[in-house]
Image (cartoon, coloured by chain):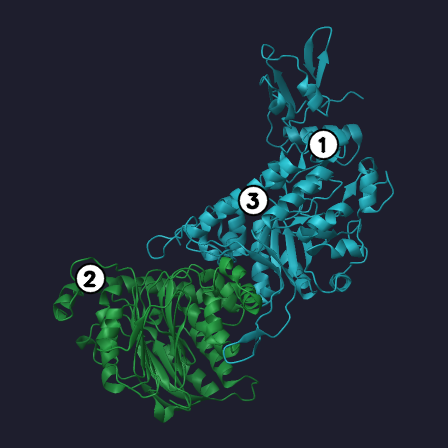
Amino acid sequence: MKAYLLPDFEVERKDEKCIRCRVCERQCAFGVHRYDEELDRMFSAEEKCVGCQRCVVFCPTNALAVFPHSSSYRPNYVWTRERISDLIKQAETGGVILTGGGNDKPYRIYFDHLVLNASQVTNPSIDPLREPMELRTFLGRKPDALPLAKAGEEDVDLEMELSPNVIVETPILFSAMSYGAISYQAFKSLAIAAKECGTLFNTGEGGFPKELRKEFGRNAIVQCASGRFGVDPEYLNCAAVIEIKIGQGAKPGIGGHLPGEKVTAWISRTRMIPEGTDALSPAPHHDIYSIEDLATLIHALKEATNYEKPVCVKIAAVHNSAAIASGIVRAGADIIALDGLRGGTGAAPKIIRDNVGIPIEMAIASVDQRLRSEGIRNKCSIIAAGGIRCSADVVKAIALGADAVYIGTAALIAMGCTLCQKCHTGKCNWGICTQDPKLAKRLNPKIAARRLVNLLRGWSLEIKEMLGGMGINAIESLRGNREHLRGVGLEEWELEVLGVKGVGE
Amino acid sequence: MKAGIAAAKEGIMRCEMREGVRRRVQRSVQRQGDVQKRRVQRVVWGGEEKEICACSLFGAMNMEGERFGGEGVVKAIANMRVRGNGLGGGFAIYGIYPKYKEYYAFHIMYEGGNEEAKKETESFLNAHFDVVFAEEIPHAECVDVNVDNPPLIWRYFVAPNKRGEMLSDDDYVVQKVMHINTRIRDAYVFSSGKNMGVFKGVGYPEDIAEYFLLKELYRGYIWTAHGRFPTNTQGWWGGAHPFNILDWTVVHNGEISSYGTNRRYLEMYGYVCTLHTDSEVFAYAVDLLMRKQRLPIDIVAKIFAPPVWELIDKMEGRERELLRTLRMVYAPLLMNGPFAIIVAHHGEMIGLTDRIRLRPLTAGIRGEMLYLSSEEAAIRLAAKKLDKVWTPNGGEPVVARLKAGVVA
């Protein structure tokens, strides 16, 4: 069948600059570039191009430019190019359209409608270069009060044992990205960076390679998802936190899918499944059909780890998140991870990614408020995920009520990702989202980890600047502090859900 | 539902306040000329200009529990006049009602002299307490004194009538005070402790003292005082310091950057901030930590103004563990931003500044008297000779306690 699709991208090659070095040809896993020896010419198959810009960056003479294809259907507000392309794809294949990355549709980004406060006159701003500025954060359940035993007149002692909490030196954690979805090299880069920055990375549902456990376990959140891949007592016990994954912002309500082609020998060992078989995680956990089932699993995991580790429950942000979160806390979870509408994925049906879930800002605000109204906000920490793009988003998320944030897409971009959204093809030219050893080795974990550390360092410095400006010198005084936020261009009901005043109020 | 009503009420309040304040501000501008004429005897410091963006705090306690008059305290707080702007002043005095010391003394303000509010409040009090005595708090005539728009202020001496409710007396009182503050329009409880009272309003503190006839009528063993320079809220009688719940009072200088965090944490424990000012959170935080959770003041100081992590990490063993846990558990009660406070309750007066000491506090001792003040000069005005004067470090509390065995 002749494919009717228009190419997405146009490849422009400035022939006078091209030296026929064929770097572009070697770099492109999608087979866009081809050298014809007889004609001594480079040709490009534009219909294969995904716009990842690998060839552009690596072309030594800057001879290449890749940009959206200039051919166009008759402009139509209703039947856009994307809609038409999707229809053509389905007409030609009869399948579900898969994609990677996060929701790219123009839903309102509330972060961009919130502005921060700064001190002027009545309250001195604090200079983070000269004064202490603290970002250390504890994640886990806190008691309402701390009964102290009086040992002597002067001495006071802790009387009770506290629920386990985990410390992060900056409130930015790496979101769940499994070995299998991303390459071993990318996985290891996240682990190295998390360790160096005193924060945590998340193994996702693909298990935790044994040889990395000893070195990086203390910085790992291990996931227990509906497929239970790679879960055994050692896996649970080597980690800092255990996360039960109920849902994911990019695909609320459905499970994961790792095609058999990607299940190599190494992956099969880590996931504990036969080589070459599809790794399908079911939509629900088949042992969790209700909140009391969740409580059972939480306690089973705590029992398996001697009550030494906080247990986190990750849910996609959906309409009833607030009520669900309350149930999760009452079921015994120590941390709730909320993943919003813009959260990324290695592979998801496009229709789900683009249409299901709610923006993370609203979810944080309503969950935080709900837990406070019920007087149980201390009993858990909230990690917000899904569309955190810069340090200001982190600050705004925390001011709305989160304890910390997960970053996934931002971390991938730091490693080299350009959001071409072809993660599900396994052909990532940047060596991140692939199991092809030739592609994966393009990513040097030491260098990628350095880029991640730089990112966290840069963001942390910026957060300190913003805190100092607000006259705050410890991140805990920002948490849930919506007085420091004001809304711009929001409607009354939106301000109400966010719990913030409008600018000038 | 509850929050909804409070919010609606706050909305109404705010509109009304704006109106009121505009009037007040106009009047105070008109008056400024003659005010200065009348007060020439108080020398304003010459030479260097003083920073005026501040409030003044003063506290005096007799640690033998002997009661004394307000002369010195009023003189001291008046000396720090430039730290205020005449939009708020107030006093808390302990030991003033020995005759009724078994009863909770409610000082209740009715904004704009609202008789309806008074009627509603009194029927509420009658339903939940046995009122043994009630009267309007005596005051000078407005025309003689420089205060603005005084509301109607009454005091009630009451005993809880719990009708089988399973609460401690104190918790019962807190609950009822919160009810009056949030549910009855135009009624605000200034103070609710036994054998103590708060007198406050819009005006310079010395004017407030004059209005309530403090020097003439009252003797107490602890006096705390406040001169206000309102910044984030407009000047109104309920917003003046001290803030109170039961016999706990707080006077505060500063602006709390962590207000939103602190307020929302306290709301979880039933404290509703109604007075539209960040200082209120101190009173409730102190009540929660010191009265309800029975934490000693040294620990509370470490919660409000904890050492930085860099220091904690260098500590050893139990101390490090304790401070780490305190910061973890009570993170929402870290009072961030500049503050100096004087907290008092029966038997104790405490001074504390924020951990990087962005507001001043000086302490002095003479015999059985301990003084706390924003400025040393004010202490020296109250007590000519001092045994010792010192400036405590940020986050380091100064505590004055009744001598062992003394019952005030």
Chain coloured cyan: which letter?
A
Seen in the image, is A374 located left or right of residue B182?
right
Q: Say which chain is green.
A: B
- Rendered view: B167 above or below B319: below
Q: Is residue A206 visible?
A: no
Asked whether residue A161 appears in the rendered view, the answer is yes
Cα distance between the residues tagged 2 and 1: 75 Å
Looking at the picture, do discs 3 and 2 lie on one chain? no
Host chain of mark 2: B
Which quadrant does the C terminus of chain A fall into?
A: bottom left
For label 1, the residue is A441
Residue type at numbered disc 3: Leu
Residue at left 48%, top 68%? B302
Indicate the quadrant where residue B75 lies.
bottom left
Chain letter of disc 1? A
Horizontal side of B27 relative to A440 (left or right) equals left
Q: Return the residue at label 3.
A: A456
